[in-house]
Image (tube, rainbow, N blue to C red):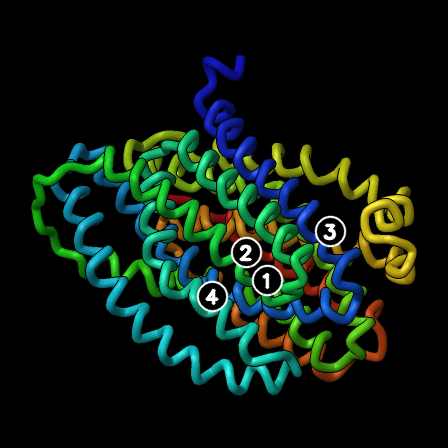
Amino acid sequence: MVKNNKFLKDNLYLLVGTGFLSVSGFFFHFFMGRSLGPEDYGVLASVMAVMALIGIFISTLQLSISKFVASFKIKKKIEELNYLFSATFKKLNKLFFILWLLFLGVNIFLSSFLEINYWFLFMASFVLLITPSIAITRGFMQGLQNFRIYGICLSIEGFFKLFLGIGLVLLGFGVGGVIAAIVLSYFIAVVYAIKMVKKSVGSSLKKFESQEIYHYTLPVFFTVLFFTAFYSFDLLLVKHFFPAVDAGNYAVVSLLGKIIFFASFSIIQVMYPKVVELSENGGRHKDVLLKSFLVTLAFSLPLLTVYYFFGGLVVNLLFGSQYLGVVNLIAPYGLFMLFVSLSKMFSLYLLSFKKYLFLYLFGFFLILEIVLLSLFHASLTQVVNILLSLGFLFTSLMGYLVVRFKE
């Protein structure tokens, strides 16, 4: 069945890669949570939240590039495809070097706001320098639907992050060593990705009007920005408003909840270029959306059930008894992340048809989240309840927009 079903086969390829990345990431956090303790683990979680914001650029460029790669592939515009690869590398590397210099200044404010060492953020900022390479290679792999290589790249990243991170902590480098391991894992994976993607492009180039890409990139940027902020700002605000130990406890809740989100990563990544392809060919694209929706629920609901009934066992086994005080927050936060996954799926579906109305709605909900969490943070339970309510409302409205949508 899987062999003859390209949708399932592609999902399986990427699921293996994302599965390895997630499992290795899980053991990574399991080790760090136990080895660093709540305070230092809270610092690490805050730095990783900042790196997730840097990831906005990666996801934005990846989605924009993958759409046009998929379109050129369908129309057999191979020379334009080659030009896209060559031109974006040159332009984006120059742009991101400038952004990196600017980010070094922003880090002064961030280190003060988050009350963490400036040099941790300085080390994390090097991800900006390799962002173009990560985004372009992933965009090409996704657009060409080469999910096997994409999965291998994610596995390489997960492997080196885990083993370099553990090794550097055992050698006594602490949080700084962990951050260095994360940056190096990105670099090693992208070296392999560049080598593999170059096999898919040639030297024959044909310049095309790139204005359309820039026009499409802006709404994609805001989509990715809003989503990343939606599930990252809570960590930063908790780090700012709560004691260090509470921030570390909340980081564990966030980590376990995000497993729900990353479990659906492969499904959404596979869905997007297939919807683009079917929309270009006049195919039944809503069938792909429905399959993606059902598969996401099939992965997420059993995990939520485990969190609800066996949350204490999960936390005690993986992180230790020092984190048991927040067990009751794991299932609600996991449900919030399911809402985030579904709303991201709906938004990418609408983006593939250049329908951008939902961005105004999302902007409103993001502002509402920041305002509500800034005003009402008497406890971690209150924080999670606010997120859960906003997630449910936003996902319901996004579902309504998708159901009403007619191409």
Q: Circle 1 sits in a helix, a strand or a loop, which is it?
A: helix
Earlier in the chain: of badge 2 and badge 3, it is 3
Real-space Cα distance between discs 2 and 3?
14 Å
Give the amino acid at mark 2: Ala
Real-space Cα distance between discs 1 and 2?
6 Å
Real-space Cα distance between discs 4 and 2?
17 Å
Earlier in the chain: of badge 3 and badge 1, it is 3
- The residue lying toward the viewer, choosing from 83 and 75, is 83
Q: Is residue 21 left or right of residue 130?
A: right
Dividing the image into 4 quarters, which one contains the C terminus?
Answer: top left
Q: Quadrant of residue 375?
A: bottom right
Circles 3 and 1: CB distance less than 8 Å? no
Instruction: List the residue tagged with mark 1.
Output: 177
Instruction: List the residue tagged with mark 3.
Output: 31
Measured as percent of width and height from the top left, residue 262 is found at: 60, 46
Q: Residues within 10 Å of mark 4 (few under 14, many from 20)?
A: some
Earlier in the chain: of badge 3 and badge 4, it is 3
* Residue 189 seen in the figure: yes
Circles 1 and 2: CB distance less than 8 Å? yes
Instruction: List the residue tagged with mark 4.
Output: 54
